[in-house]
Image (cartoon, rainbow, N blue to C red):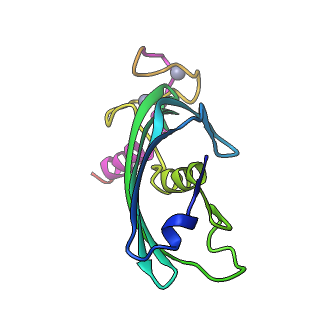
Amino acid sequence: MQFNLTEILSNDGMNQKISTDIGIKELDLGNNIYQVVNPIHIDLDITNLGDKKMNLQGTVTGTLNIPCDRCMEEVDHKIETNFSKDIKFQDNEDVTWYIDGYNLDLEKLALDELIIDLPMKVLCSDTCKGICNQCGVNLNKGTCDCDNSDIDPRLAVFKDLFKEF
Ligand SMILES: [Zn+2]
Ligand SMILES: [Zn+2]
C-alpha cells in the first residue's frame, strides 16, 4: 500500500491525514507467526516541515493472537502504539526502508512500529501456572502427579533455607 509524498513534499507546511487498514492476515516474524485477529490499522498525520523535512505522526492498532509464554494457550493481544518521527529527504538517497523514492509504504511503516511495540512475553494471566514440564499437562486446566518440587527454582531456595534451621 503506497502513498505518494510528492505533493506534500512540494508544499511547505502542508498537512495530510491518512487512516487505513493494513490488509495482512498474519505477522511473520521468522521464528513466530502470529494471526491477526482485528485488522492492523494505521492513523497517520504527515506534515511538511519545510526544507525537505517531514514529520510522520500516528497510531498503529490491532489485535494479534499470541501464545502464552508459559502454557502456550493463544491469547488475543491488543496493540496500540504511538509514534512521531522526522524524516529528512536527501537527493538520490533512500531515507528509510519504508520510503522508496517518494513513495511511503504504509504497510512497512505500520509493521515497523508494531514490531517495536511487541512485548517479549505475553501471558494469558499473571497467575498462569504453565505446563508441567514432565507430562505436558496444562496446569491451569488440570493437575498431575509429577514431582516438580526440584524444578521450580523459587521452591529450591526455600528448601535450602529450611535446611539451615
Ligand atoms: Zn498461560
Ligand atoms: Zn505432570
Q: Determine whether 109 is above or below 48 in the image.
A: above
- On whether residue 145 falls in the magenta region, the answer is yes
Classify residue 70 as left or right of residue 136: left
The part of the chain drawn in magenta is: 142-163
Who's the residue at 55% across and 51% down the image? 106
Residue 27 image-quadrant placement: top right
76 or 101, which lies in front? 101
Give coordinates of residue 131: x percent, y percent: 50, 27
Q: Is residue 156 a member of the stretch shown in magenta?
A: yes
Rendered residue at 58%/78% (across/down): 89
Where residue 34 appears, as percent x and y from the top left, is: 58, 35
User: Which of the two residues, 11 or 115, is positioned nearer the viewer here?
Assistant: 11
Q: Residue at x 34, y 32 (%)?
A: 125
Q: Is residue 44 visible?
A: no
Residue 95 location (% of width, % of height): 62, 74
Q: Position of residue 21 (x, y in %)?
A: 48, 38
Quarter where residue 76 is shown: top left
Please identify the residue farthest to the left as the structure is shown: 165
**Rendered position, 130 above or below 143:** below
Residue at the extreme bottom: 51
Observer able to see residue 30: yes
Q: Is residue 71 above or below residue 155?
A: above
Q: In the drawing, does residue 3 fall left or right of residue 144?
A: right
Residue at left offset 55%, top offset 63%: 5
